[in-house]
Amino acid sequence: MSNSRGGFPCPPVNAESVKSIIIVGVGGQGTLLASRIMGDALVQKGYDVKVSEVHGMSQRGGSVITYVRYGDEVNSPVIENGEADIILAFEELEAARYLPFLKPGGTVITSTQQIDPMPVITGAAEYPQEVILAIESLGITVRRLDALSLAKQAGSVRAVNVVLIGALAKDMDIEKEVWLSALEKCVPEKFLELNQKAFELGYNSY
């Protein structure tokens, strides 16, 4: 089938020009704010951006996943297995849970925080040991940081999300000033200074 618009042939969309990032965490960690900051920064750079937020288990303690896709032209917000360039994980076990989405050569950026899922809380299971080492043993590049400690240093444990956005920003081809501008747009003014500090701590964490 020919690809045309208005009777004129159109060049095919280059799938390689579309990048995919998955943000994973648990309810209450602020993953949705993180995706909004990222989306704003990408729009400022002129990308077509699609964000899909999955709320199914977003109550506190339940798994939450957000898809972010960007490029010259993005047709779908959905990320399939093996398509994610980066997994940004707010918690170790969530990083492992969504590994099938990572493409070969992709990167995992994860907080070293561990939050017990319900089976662990009820005693039906134990939290797996050495999760990050197990991921690295698969040949996957992992950038780890203690985002919770850095958030406390910034002034609030609730700033874990912005610490992680700072860490992600260091791996992306977007100027720091653009990220800080997105932060100003997405964070209430009374919390802005705290979150600016959280971003800087994440950005300079490795």
Image: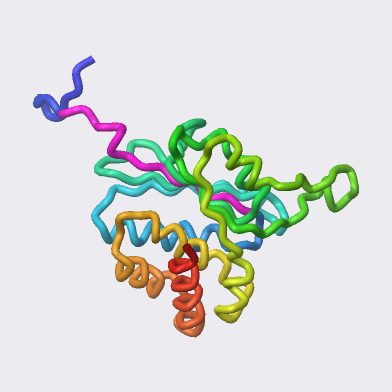
Q: Residue furthest top?
A: 1
Range of residues picked out in magenta:
11-25
Give the answer, above or below, for where 151 lies relative to 77: below
Q: Residue furthest right?
A: 123
- Which residue is at 23% across, 15% downward? 1
Inspect this view and state whether residue 78 appears.
no
Q: Position of residue 146 (x, y in %)?
A: 61, 64
Q: Is residue 103 magenta?
A: no
Give the answer, above or below, for where 55 lies relative to 140: below
Q: Residue furthest left?
A: 8
Q: Is residue 15 magenta?
A: yes
- Which residue is at 36% across, 61% downward? 40
Inspect this view and state whether residue 176 appears.
yes
The chosen color scheme is rainbow
The answer to whether residue 41 is left or right of residue 156 is: left
Q: Quadrant of residue 18?
A: top left
The answer to whether residue 46 is left or right of residue 106 is: left
Give the answer, above or below, for where 182 lies relative to 129: below
How many marks on residues? 0
Q: Position of residue 82 (x, y in %)?
A: 48, 31
Q: Position of residue 128 (x, y in %)?
A: 76, 45
Front-lying residue, 62 or 3: 62
- Which residue is at 57% across, 52% downward? 89
- Which residue is at 44% across, 68% downward? 204
Q: Position of residue 141 (x, y in %)?
A: 50, 44
The answer to whether residue 17 is left or right of residue 53 is: left
